[in-house]
Image: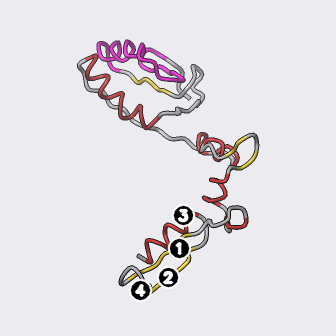
Amino acid sequence: MMPEQQNIEYKSVWKDEYLKWICGFANAHGGTLFIGKDDNDNVTGVKNAKKLLEDLPNKITTVLGIIADVNLHETEQCNKDTPEQLLDNLKLIDNGHLKRAALLLFHLDPEKFVTGAYIKIGFFRSESDLQFQDDIHGNLFEQIEKTMELL
């Protein structure tokens, strides 16, 4: 655990006003601004980490005229979501119930719940000359993989 000090600052979310901290670090002896940690060095996580990784270097260079390293640090603590939390984060739960998309994506046999949840593929020599056909079953991930193999 590293407490906040002159060259270390923790912020739970990014706000553009924190550019002043980066400017202060640049004008002093450098420093590190951690986004996704509270003032006690506890990980709070960052919801838009990918977007921040893309936007922050450009914003820092454009506004301050300096180049700063922007890095993503992952911790075990943020990767311990329960299956329910993951499904909720993916917007696959509604009022405590799985949506059809969750069944289509992850259930071993989604056709039990959604009629016609399979891929039918065929090869035609002409408009009426069917040479080959196949039905591809399973969850959507399996269907895509099997379809690509077949093609």
Residue 86 in the figure: left or right of residue 74: right
* Residue at point 30%, 17% (across, down): 26
Q: Disc number at residue 45?
A: none
- Which residue in the structure is indicated by mark 2? 133
The label nearer to you, 2 versus 4, is 4
- Which residue in the structure is indicated by mark 1? 120
Q: Give the spatial CA distance, label 3 vs label 4.
A: 30 Å
Counting residues from the start of the chain, the first of labels 3 and 1 encountered is: 1
* Residue at point 72%, 67% (across, down): 112
Place residue 78 in its image quadrant: top right
- Which residue in the structure is indicated by mark 3? 141
Check the image and report above or below for 116 versus 127.
Answer: above
- Please rate how many residues cluster around mark 2, counting C-alpha atoms within 10 Å: few if below 14, some from 14 to 19, many from 20: few
Q: Position of residue 122 (x, y in %)?
A: 46, 78
* Residue at point 43%, 38% (across, down): 50
Q: 4 or 109, which lies in front?
A: 109
- Of helix, strand and loop, which one carries label 1? strand
Q: 20 or 25, which lies in front?
A: 20
- Of helix, strand and loop, which one carries label 4? loop
- Which residue in the structure is indicated by mark 4? 129
Q: Is residue 70 magenta?
A: no
Check the image and report above or below for 42 versus 103.
Answer: above
- Of helix, strand and loop, which one carries label 3? helix
Q: Are marks 3 and 1 in contact (CB under 8 Å)?
A: no
Check the image and report above or below for 121 versus 51.
Answer: below
The label nearer to you, 3 versus 1, is 1
Going by the numbered disc 2, the residue's amino acid type is: Gln
